[in-house]
Image (cartoon, rainbow, N blue to C red):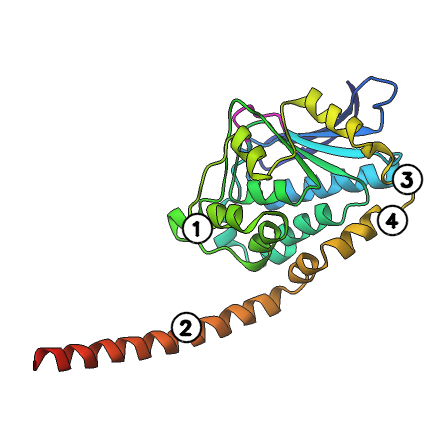
Amino acid sequence: MTTHFTVPIASTGGSIICTSPSGPDQQNIYVLTFTSPKDNRLTPEFIDAMILALDIIEHRYPKGVVVTTSGIAKFYSNGLDLEVLMGMEGFLEKWLWRLFRRFLTYPMPTVCLLNGHAFAGGFMLAMYHDYRVQNPEKGFLCVNELEFGVPLQTPMMSIFREKLTPTTFRNVVLESHRFGGKASLQAGIVDAVGGLEETFSLIKDRKLLGKAATGIYGTMKEEMYSRVLNELDNHEGNLKWRETVDEKKDVLQRRGLENVVAWEKKASKL
């Protein structure tokens, strides 16, 4: 592998290293291996480093394919750091949505190599890539917010709604189902199972290296995923929609409780 550059992640002493395989027909495959102990949480520092790495490839290297994977064997990413999320105003719109948007519209094919667990935000990040390859032997994909009572916001839901079948979408969100590699492939979440060699084979078999040559690859994705893109760019509108839905829900709950109380009074007199 040829090493191109390294972007540090100062907050954890980690880094993102960009390499390419040595094969003559693979030099424009850019593998971004991120290592941010202990489990690659999506913090502002991590996100800034990842976006910078993507910018460097776009502006300083020939068009090709970007592969992301983890240098930590157990985890691709364990998602958000909730302490950071709760303690930092604007984290979602200033960092997380920006990261998701960058991958959704990136002007080259992107492939996520899931070497280990990808939970919650880590799973979402994988879905914002164009293709996914998962380790068939270890690691699960799971959205587990239901288990600890944190509702998903619109851009977190929309990418699953866009890319998964309704049944798989339900199992991901309402069951917090854990998908191993073979189950992910069967459900259509990933495109292949394996490691780096299988990822390179997917790139070759689908002729991905030449897809960005005409310069419209990102534009095609913007049109293809326009609904998701609009939701990423409409943070205030999403919050307002949520507020309206909650207000209507509160009215219905009050009416429902009033009906129950009236029914109980009537039943007690029988």
> Could you tell me if the residues under marks 2 and 4 are in contact, i.e. CB atoms within 8 Å?
no
Residue 118 higher or lower than 247, as above or below: above
Tell me the number on the disc at residue 216: 4
Q: Which of marks 3 and 1 is nearer the N terminus?
A: 1
Q: Earlier in the sequence, mark 4 or mark 1?
A: 1
Q: Name the residue under label 3.
A: 213
> Could you tell me if the residues under marks 3 and 1 are in contact, i.e. CB atoms within 8 Å?
no
Picture quadrant of residue 2: top right
In terms of secondary structure, where does tag 1 sit? helix
Q: Mark 1 points at which residue?
A: 174
Residue 254 higher or lower than 189, as above or below: below
Query: What whole-number distance in Å separates the C-alpha atoms at marks 2 and 4?
Result: 43 Å
In terms of secondary structure, where does tag 2 sit? helix
- Hey, what amino acid is under mark 2? Lys
Query: What whole-number distance in Å separates the C-alpha atoms at marks 2 and 1?
Result: 19 Å
Magenta residues? 70-75
> Could you tell me if the residues under marks 2 and 3 are in contact, i.e. CB atoms within 8 Å?
no
x 76%, y 34%: residue: 66
Select label 3 or label 1 by which is in front: 1
- Hey, what amino acid is under mark 4? Ile
- Hey, what amino acid is under mark 1? Leu
Residue 70 is left or right of residue 86, and the answer is: right
